[in-house]
Amino acid sequence: MNKFIALLVGMILLSVAGSCNADYKDWSEKEKQQYKVFIALQVVDTAQTIHMINCQKRTRCPLYELNPILGSNPRKAELLALKVIGNFIIYKLLDKSTKRSKTLRILNIVGSIVVT
């Protein structure tokens, strides 16, 4: 079930990016690849958080969320809403950015730290 949810979240995130009226087609191949890595890290982070939420349903779960927006015991709906809205905003900002590659590199470094 967790794999299905992760796949579903990944499809949602990718569809949100694709449905924007932005000029993704005008991005360089490097920027497109960096953005794909960013989305992959978002999917991994979401899957890990869903695993934590499921764990918290048990009596003894040592896991808790560190994201101050979500709080220590988030719900799946809150997580998905935050991811969709947050990624939409990030995409729009990236599309307007003149330093897209540098920004994506920083986002991917931070994302890599978050999921490890």
Image: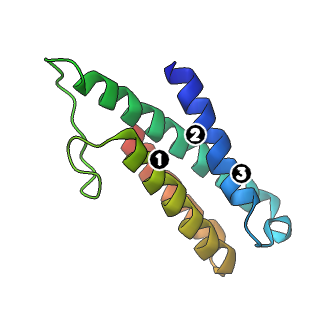
| Marks 2 and 3, how far apart at CA | 10 Å
Left or right, 71 with reference to 52: left
Question: What residue is disc 3 on?
Answer: 15
The image quadrant that residue 88 belongs to is bottom right
**Badges 1 and 2: C-beta atoms under 8 Å apart?**
yes
Is any part of residue 91 visible from this angle? yes
Q: Tag 2: residue type?
A: Val
* Mark 1 nearby-residue class (10 Å; few <14, some 14–19, many ≥20): some
Vertical relation: 35 (above or below) 24:
above
Vertical relation: 110 (above or below) 4:
below
Vertical relation: 20 (above or below) 10:
below
Q: Secondary structure at mark 2?
A: helix
Q: Tag 3: residue type?
A: Ser
* Mark 2 nearby-residue class (10 Å; few <14, some 14–19, many ≥20): many
Vertical relation: 34 (above or below) 100:
above
Q: Earlier in the sequence, mark 1 or mark 2?
A: 2
Question: What residue is disc 2 on?
Answer: 9
Left or right, 33 with reference to 110: right
Q: Secondary structure at mark 1?
A: helix
- Toward the front, the furthest residue is 77
Q: Tag 1: residue type?
A: Leu
Left or right, 87 with reference to 63: right
Is residue 44 or residue 108 the one in the foreground?
44
Residue at image location 33% in from the left, 25% down from the top: 54
Is any part of residue 37 visible from this angle? no
Question: What residue is disc 1 on?
Answer: 80
The image quadrant that residue 31 belongs to is bottom right
* Mark 3 nearby-residue class (10 Å; few <14, some 14–19, many ≥20): few
Residue at image location 45% in from the left, 44% down from the top: 112
Residue at image location 21% in from the left, 18% down from the top: 58
